[in-house]
Amino acid sequence: MRHLLVTGGAGFIGTNFVYYWLNKYPEDHVVVLDALTYAGNRQNLTRAEKNPKFEFVHGNILDQPLVESLLAGHRIDTIVHFAAESHVDRSITGPDEFINTNIVGTHTLLKAARKLWLDDKTIPHRFHHISTDEVYGSLKPYDPPFTEKTPYAPNSPYAASKAASDHLVRAYHKTYGLSTTISNCSNNYGPFQFPEKLIPLIITHILYGKPLPVYGDGKQIRDWLYVDDHSFGIDLILGKGKTGETYNIGGNNEWANIDIVKLVCELLDKEFRKNPALVQKFPGCPSSKGSHPETLITHVTDRPGHDRRYAVDAAKIISSHGYAPKESFETGIQKTLTWFLEKEMILL
Protein backbone atom coordinates (compact mmCIF):
# COMPACT_ATOMS: atom_id res chain seq x y z
CA MET A 1 0.00 0.00 0.00
CA ARG A 2 1.30 3.41 -0.97
CA HIS A 3 0.48 6.85 0.42
CA LEU A 4 0.58 9.48 -2.34
CA LEU A 5 0.63 13.26 -2.19
CA VAL A 6 -0.50 14.61 -5.57
CA THR A 7 0.22 18.31 -5.97
CA GLY A 8 -1.99 20.19 -8.41
CA GLY A 9 -4.46 17.31 -8.35
CA ALA A 10 -7.45 19.54 -9.14
CA GLY A 11 -5.91 20.59 -12.44
CA PHE A 12 -6.25 18.86 -15.78
CA ILE A 13 -3.52 16.21 -15.75
CA GLY A 14 -3.58 15.84 -11.97
CA THR A 15 -7.31 15.15 -11.91
CA ASN A 16 -7.03 12.45 -14.54
CA PHE A 17 -4.09 10.90 -12.70
CA VAL A 18 -6.06 10.80 -9.43
CA TYR A 19 -8.93 8.90 -11.09
CA TYR A 20 -6.48 6.60 -12.85
CA TRP A 21 -4.68 5.79 -9.61
CA LEU A 22 -7.75 5.30 -7.41
CA ASN A 23 -9.24 2.99 -10.01
CA LYS A 24 -6.09 0.90 -10.51
CA TYR A 25 -4.83 0.88 -6.92
CA PRO A 26 -7.93 0.96 -4.69
CA GLU A 27 -5.93 0.13 -1.53
CA ASP A 28 -3.64 3.16 -1.84
CA HIS A 29 -4.26 6.46 -0.08
CA VAL A 30 -4.26 9.61 -2.22
CA VAL A 31 -4.01 13.13 -0.80
CA VAL A 32 -4.37 16.06 -3.20
CA LEU A 33 -2.81 19.42 -2.37
CA ASP A 34 -4.06 22.21 -4.64
CA ALA A 35 -4.16 26.00 -4.33
CA LEU A 36 -7.24 26.15 -6.60
CA THR A 37 -5.93 28.89 -8.85
CA TYR A 38 -7.89 29.68 -12.02
CA ALA A 39 -7.04 26.34 -13.70
CA GLY A 40 -7.74 24.17 -10.66
CA ASN A 41 -11.31 23.12 -9.97
CA ARG A 42 -12.30 21.12 -6.90
CA GLN A 43 -15.48 20.01 -8.67
CA ASN A 44 -13.23 17.97 -10.98
CA LEU A 45 -12.69 15.66 -7.99
CA THR A 46 -16.33 15.26 -6.92
CA ARG A 47 -16.32 11.51 -7.60
CA ALA A 48 -12.97 11.06 -5.88
CA GLU A 49 -14.20 12.77 -2.71
CA LYS A 50 -16.69 9.94 -2.21
CA ASN A 51 -13.77 7.54 -1.85
CA PRO A 52 -12.59 6.99 1.77
CA LYS A 53 -9.04 6.53 0.46
CA PHE A 54 -8.99 10.09 -0.90
CA GLU A 55 -8.52 13.45 0.80
CA PHE A 56 -8.42 16.97 -0.61
CA VAL A 57 -6.38 19.73 1.02
CA HIS A 58 -6.73 23.33 -0.13
CA GLY A 59 -3.26 24.79 0.19
CA ASN A 60 -0.15 25.98 -1.58
CA ILE A 61 3.04 24.07 -2.30
CA LEU A 62 4.91 27.21 -1.14
CA ASP A 63 3.66 26.56 2.40
CA GLN A 64 6.46 24.34 3.70
CA PRO A 65 4.97 23.76 7.19
CA LEU A 66 1.75 22.57 5.56
CA VAL A 67 3.62 20.24 3.21
CA GLU A 68 5.63 18.83 6.11
CA SER A 69 2.48 18.25 8.16
CA LEU A 70 0.89 16.37 5.25
CA LEU A 71 3.96 14.20 4.71
CA ALA A 72 4.10 13.31 8.39
CA GLY A 73 0.38 13.12 9.16
CA HIS A 74 -0.50 10.95 6.18
CA ARG A 75 2.70 8.88 6.18
CA ILE A 76 3.31 9.99 2.59
CA ASP A 77 5.90 7.88 0.78
CA THR A 78 5.31 9.13 -2.78
CA ILE A 79 4.98 12.68 -4.10
CA VAL A 80 3.67 13.12 -7.64
CA HIS A 81 4.30 16.76 -8.42
CA PHE A 82 1.97 18.21 -11.07
CA ALA A 83 1.40 21.67 -9.56
CA ALA A 84 2.66 24.33 -11.95
CA GLU A 85 1.79 27.43 -13.87
CA SER A 86 1.77 26.04 -17.39
CA HIS A 87 0.37 28.42 -20.00
CA VAL A 88 3.08 29.94 -22.19
CA ASP A 89 1.06 33.07 -23.07
CA ARG A 90 0.56 33.87 -19.39
CA SER A 91 4.27 33.36 -18.74
CA ILE A 92 5.09 35.96 -21.39
CA THR A 93 2.82 38.63 -19.89
CA GLY A 94 3.39 37.71 -16.23
CA PRO A 95 6.52 35.61 -15.66
CA ASP A 96 6.84 36.27 -11.92
CA GLU A 97 4.13 33.78 -10.95
CA PHE A 98 5.85 31.09 -12.99
CA ILE A 99 9.15 31.65 -11.22
CA ASN A 100 7.43 31.60 -7.85
CA THR A 101 5.27 28.51 -8.35
CA ASN A 102 7.39 26.40 -10.65
CA ILE A 103 10.83 27.05 -9.18
CA VAL A 104 10.33 28.20 -5.59
CA GLY A 105 7.32 25.91 -5.14
CA THR A 106 9.22 22.87 -6.36
CA HIS A 107 12.14 23.76 -4.11
CA THR A 108 9.78 24.06 -1.14
CA LEU A 109 8.50 20.54 -1.79
CA LEU A 110 12.03 19.21 -2.13
CA LYS A 111 13.07 20.81 1.17
CA ALA A 112 10.07 19.31 2.95
CA ALA A 113 10.70 15.88 1.41
CA ARG A 114 14.35 15.97 2.40
CA LYS A 115 13.50 16.96 5.98
CA LEU A 116 10.82 14.27 6.45
CA TRP A 117 12.40 11.46 4.47
CA LEU A 118 16.14 11.91 4.91
CA ASP A 119 17.20 14.09 7.84
CA ASP A 120 16.65 11.63 10.73
CA LYS A 121 16.62 8.36 8.83
CA THR A 122 16.11 7.27 5.27
CA ILE A 123 12.47 6.33 4.71
CA PRO A 124 11.60 4.47 1.47
CA HIS A 125 10.18 7.15 -0.79
CA ARG A 126 9.85 8.59 -4.28
CA PHE A 127 9.60 12.18 -5.48
CA HIS A 128 8.29 12.17 -9.05
CA HIS A 129 8.41 15.47 -10.92
CA ILE A 130 6.20 16.15 -13.94
CA SER A 131 7.90 18.28 -16.58
CA THR A 132 7.49 19.17 -20.24
CA ASP A 133 9.11 18.73 -23.63
CA GLU A 134 9.35 22.51 -23.87
CA VAL A 135 12.53 22.51 -21.76
CA TYR A 136 14.37 21.16 -24.81
CA GLY A 137 13.56 24.14 -27.01
CA SER A 138 12.40 23.89 -30.61
CA LEU A 139 12.98 21.35 -33.39
CA LYS A 140 13.49 22.03 -37.07
CA PRO A 141 11.15 20.23 -39.48
CA TYR A 142 13.41 17.23 -40.09
CA ASP A 143 15.22 17.06 -36.75
CA PRO A 144 14.88 13.81 -34.81
CA PRO A 145 12.63 14.03 -31.72
CA PHE A 146 13.98 15.08 -28.35
CA THR A 147 15.62 12.38 -26.25
CA GLU A 148 16.49 12.44 -22.57
CA LYS A 149 20.02 13.47 -23.60
CA THR A 150 18.92 16.51 -25.62
CA PRO A 151 20.48 19.68 -24.11
CA TYR A 152 18.03 22.03 -22.45
CA ALA A 153 17.27 25.20 -24.44
CA PRO A 154 14.02 26.74 -23.08
CA ASN A 155 12.60 29.61 -25.10
CA SER A 156 9.79 30.97 -22.89
CA PRO A 157 9.60 31.98 -19.22
CA TYR A 158 7.36 28.95 -18.67
CA ALA A 159 9.84 26.54 -20.24
CA ALA A 160 12.74 28.17 -18.38
CA SER A 161 10.93 27.81 -15.05
CA LYS A 162 10.27 24.13 -15.70
CA ALA A 163 13.88 23.58 -16.77
CA ALA A 164 15.04 25.16 -13.51
CA SER A 165 12.74 22.94 -11.47
CA ASP A 166 14.02 19.86 -13.33
CA HIS A 167 17.57 20.82 -12.38
CA LEU A 168 16.61 21.29 -8.74
CA VAL A 169 15.05 17.83 -8.60
CA ARG A 170 18.16 16.31 -10.15
CA ALA A 171 20.38 18.23 -7.73
CA TYR A 172 18.47 16.97 -4.70
CA HIS A 173 19.03 13.43 -5.90
CA LYS A 174 22.72 13.91 -6.62
CA THR A 175 23.54 16.03 -3.56
CA TYR A 176 21.27 14.69 -0.84
CA GLY A 177 20.31 11.24 -2.08
CA LEU A 178 16.60 11.99 -2.47
CA SER A 179 14.93 9.25 -4.52
CA THR A 180 13.64 11.18 -7.53
CA THR A 181 12.41 10.59 -11.06
CA ILE A 182 11.44 13.09 -13.75
CA SER A 183 9.16 12.71 -16.76
CA ASN A 184 9.06 15.14 -19.68
CA CYS A 185 5.80 14.78 -21.57
CA SER A 186 4.48 16.04 -24.88
CA ASN A 187 1.21 18.01 -25.27
CA ASN A 188 -1.61 16.40 -23.29
CA TYR A 189 -5.29 16.48 -24.22
CA GLY A 190 -8.43 14.92 -22.78
CA PRO A 191 -11.23 15.51 -20.21
CA PHE A 192 -11.07 18.26 -17.58
CA GLN A 193 -8.61 20.44 -19.53
CA PHE A 194 -9.02 24.15 -18.87
CA PRO A 195 -10.07 25.93 -22.09
CA GLU A 196 -6.96 28.03 -22.55
CA LYS A 197 -4.97 25.24 -24.24
CA LEU A 198 -5.48 24.58 -27.94
CA ILE A 199 -7.85 21.61 -28.11
CA PRO A 200 -10.34 22.60 -25.36
CA LEU A 201 -10.19 26.23 -26.50
CA ILE A 202 -11.09 25.23 -30.04
CA ILE A 203 -13.90 22.96 -28.85
CA THR A 204 -15.50 25.55 -26.57
CA HIS A 205 -15.11 28.39 -29.07
CA ILE A 206 -16.81 26.34 -31.77
CA LEU A 207 -19.70 25.41 -29.46
CA TYR A 208 -20.33 29.05 -28.60
CA GLY A 209 -19.56 30.56 -31.99
CA LYS A 210 -16.42 32.44 -30.94
CA PRO A 211 -13.43 33.09 -33.24
CA LEU A 212 -10.81 30.34 -33.43
CA PRO A 213 -7.48 32.14 -32.94
CA VAL A 214 -4.58 30.52 -34.81
CA TYR A 215 -1.09 31.88 -34.25
CA GLY A 216 0.69 32.90 -37.46
CA ASP A 217 0.36 30.31 -40.21
CA GLY A 218 -0.72 27.63 -37.73
CA LYS A 219 1.98 25.24 -38.90
CA GLN A 220 3.60 24.86 -35.49
CA ILE A 221 3.89 21.12 -34.84
CA ARG A 222 3.21 19.34 -31.56
CA ASP A 223 3.25 15.72 -30.42
CA TRP A 224 -0.13 14.93 -28.83
CA LEU A 225 -0.58 12.55 -25.89
CA TYR A 226 -3.92 11.42 -24.46
CA VAL A 227 -3.91 12.22 -20.75
CA ASP A 228 -4.62 8.66 -19.54
CA ASP A 229 -1.61 7.43 -21.52
CA HIS A 230 0.45 9.99 -19.62
CA SER A 231 -0.89 8.59 -16.32
CA PHE A 232 0.04 5.10 -17.50
CA GLY A 233 3.59 6.27 -18.20
CA ILE A 234 3.90 7.83 -14.73
CA ASP A 235 2.57 4.59 -13.22
CA LEU A 236 5.31 2.62 -14.96
CA ILE A 237 7.99 5.05 -13.77
CA LEU A 238 6.78 4.91 -10.17
CA GLY A 239 6.78 1.13 -10.28
CA LYS A 240 9.85 0.39 -12.38
CA GLY A 241 11.72 3.66 -12.90
CA LYS A 242 15.32 3.92 -11.79
CA THR A 243 15.89 6.61 -9.19
CA GLY A 244 17.68 9.67 -10.53
CA GLU A 245 16.53 9.00 -14.09
CA THR A 246 14.50 11.07 -16.54
CA TYR A 247 11.96 9.54 -18.94
CA ASN A 248 10.25 11.10 -21.94
CA ILE A 249 6.55 10.26 -22.34
CA GLY A 250 5.18 10.95 -25.82
CA GLY A 251 2.35 10.00 -28.10
CA ASN A 252 4.33 9.55 -31.34
CA ASN A 253 1.58 11.65 -32.84
CA GLU A 254 2.74 14.88 -34.51
CA TRP A 255 0.17 17.34 -35.84
CA ALA A 256 0.35 20.93 -37.07
CA ASN A 257 -1.88 23.25 -35.03
CA ILE A 258 -3.93 24.32 -38.05
CA ASP A 259 -4.62 20.69 -38.90
CA ILE A 260 -5.78 20.03 -35.33
CA VAL A 261 -8.14 23.01 -35.58
CA LYS A 262 -9.59 21.82 -38.89
CA LEU A 263 -9.96 18.26 -37.59
CA VAL A 264 -11.90 19.40 -34.52
CA CYS A 265 -14.09 21.59 -36.74
CA GLU A 266 -14.91 18.62 -38.95
CA LEU A 267 -15.53 16.18 -36.11
CA LEU A 268 -17.82 18.57 -34.25
CA ASP A 269 -19.74 19.36 -37.42
CA LYS A 270 -20.32 15.62 -37.87
CA GLU A 271 -21.56 15.37 -34.28
CA PHE A 272 -24.11 18.09 -34.93
CA ARG A 273 -25.31 16.36 -38.10
CA LYS A 274 -25.73 13.08 -36.21
CA ASN A 275 -27.39 14.54 -33.12
CA PRO A 276 -30.03 17.26 -33.70
CA ALA A 277 -30.31 17.79 -29.92
CA LEU A 278 -26.95 19.56 -30.04
CA VAL A 279 -28.53 22.34 -32.12
CA GLN A 280 -30.79 23.19 -29.19
CA LYS A 281 -28.01 22.76 -26.66
CA PHE A 282 -25.48 24.96 -28.49
CA PRO A 283 -27.43 27.43 -30.65
CA GLY A 284 -24.37 29.65 -31.11
CA CYS A 285 -22.37 26.98 -32.92
CA PRO A 286 -22.05 27.56 -36.70
CA SER A 287 -23.24 23.99 -37.25
CA SER A 288 -26.53 24.96 -35.59
CA LYS A 289 -26.97 27.68 -38.19
CA GLY A 290 -26.17 25.73 -41.34
CA SER A 291 -22.57 26.91 -41.48
CA HIS A 292 -19.25 25.12 -40.95
CA PRO A 293 -17.06 25.74 -37.88
CA GLU A 294 -14.05 26.45 -40.11
CA THR A 295 -15.61 29.85 -40.84
CA LEU A 296 -14.53 30.82 -37.30
CA ILE A 297 -10.79 30.35 -38.01
CA THR A 298 -8.96 33.63 -37.46
CA HIS A 299 -5.20 33.96 -37.93
CA VAL A 300 -3.63 36.22 -35.30
CA THR A 301 -0.14 37.63 -34.71
CA ASP A 302 2.25 34.90 -33.70
CA ARG A 303 3.33 34.50 -30.09
CA PRO A 304 6.78 35.98 -29.26
CA GLY A 305 9.45 33.28 -29.32
CA HIS A 306 6.95 30.67 -30.47
CA ASP A 307 8.64 27.26 -30.75
CA ARG A 308 8.06 25.74 -34.18
CA ARG A 309 8.04 22.05 -33.38
CA TYR A 310 8.11 19.70 -30.39
CA ALA A 311 8.36 15.93 -30.51
CA VAL A 312 9.75 13.47 -27.98
CA ASP A 313 11.38 10.12 -28.45
CA ALA A 314 9.88 7.74 -25.85
CA ALA A 315 12.20 4.85 -26.77
CA LYS A 316 13.71 4.74 -23.26
CA ILE A 317 10.45 4.11 -21.40
CA ILE A 318 9.22 1.85 -24.20
CA SER A 319 12.29 -0.40 -24.10
CA SER A 320 12.81 -0.38 -20.33
CA HIS A 321 9.21 -0.46 -19.08
CA GLY A 322 7.07 -1.66 -22.00
CA TYR A 323 5.27 1.66 -22.43
CA ALA A 324 2.93 2.18 -25.36
CA PRO A 325 0.03 4.65 -25.73
CA LYS A 326 -3.27 2.80 -25.43
CA GLU A 327 -5.31 5.44 -27.26
CA SER A 328 -4.94 6.31 -30.92
CA PHE A 329 -5.45 9.95 -31.75
CA GLU A 330 -8.77 9.04 -33.35
CA THR A 331 -10.12 7.36 -30.21
CA GLY A 332 -8.59 9.91 -27.84
CA ILE A 333 -9.94 12.98 -29.62
CA GLN A 334 -13.39 11.39 -29.86
CA LYS A 335 -13.41 10.71 -26.10
CA THR A 336 -12.38 14.31 -25.53
CA LEU A 337 -15.13 15.74 -27.75
CA THR A 338 -17.75 13.52 -26.14
CA TRP A 339 -16.72 14.66 -22.66
CA PHE A 340 -16.94 18.35 -23.54
CA LEU A 341 -20.31 17.90 -25.25
CA GLU A 342 -21.73 16.03 -22.28
CA LYS A 343 -20.32 18.39 -19.68
CA GLU A 344 -21.73 21.52 -21.33
CA MET A 345 -18.50 23.41 -20.70
CA ILE A 346 -18.97 27.14 -20.51
CA LEU A 347 -16.56 29.45 -22.27
CA LEU A 348 -14.12 30.90 -19.74
Image: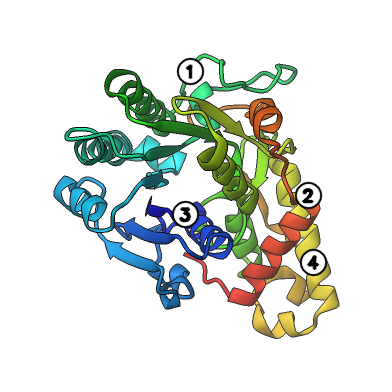
The residue labelled by disc 2 is 328
Q: How far is disc 3 from disc 1 in space, using C-alphas?
A: 26 Å
The residue labelled by disc 3 is 14
Amino acid bearing label 2: Ser
The residue labelled by disc 1 is 153
Seen in the image, is 106 located left or right of residue 111?
right
Q: Earlier in the sequence, mark 4 or mark 2?
A: 4
Amino acid bearing label 3: Gly
Q: How far is disc 1 from disc 4 in space, using C-alphas?
A: 40 Å
Q: Position of residue 103 (x, y in %)?
A: 30, 33
Q: Earlier in the sequence, mark 3 or mark 4?
A: 3
The residue labelled by disc 4 is 269
Amino acid bearing label 1: Ala
The kind of secondary structure element at disc 3 is helix
Asked whether 98 or 217 is in front, the reply is 98
Q: How far is disc 4 from disc 2 in space, using C-alphas?
A: 21 Å
Amino acid bearing label 4: Asp
In front: mark 4 or mark 2?
A: 2
Q: Position of residue 36 (x, y in %)?
A: 32, 60
The kind of secondary structure element at disc 2 is loop
Asked whether 160 or 115 is in front, the reply is 115
Q: Are marks 1 and 2 in contact (CB under 8 Å)?
A: no
Above or below 122: residue 135: above
Q: Residue at x 53, y 22 (%)?
A: 137
Q: Residue at x 38, y 31 (%)?
A: 179
In front: mark 3 or mark 4?
A: 3
Q: Are marks 4 and 2 in contact (CB under 8 Å)?
A: no
Seen in the image, is 158 located left or right of residue 59?
right
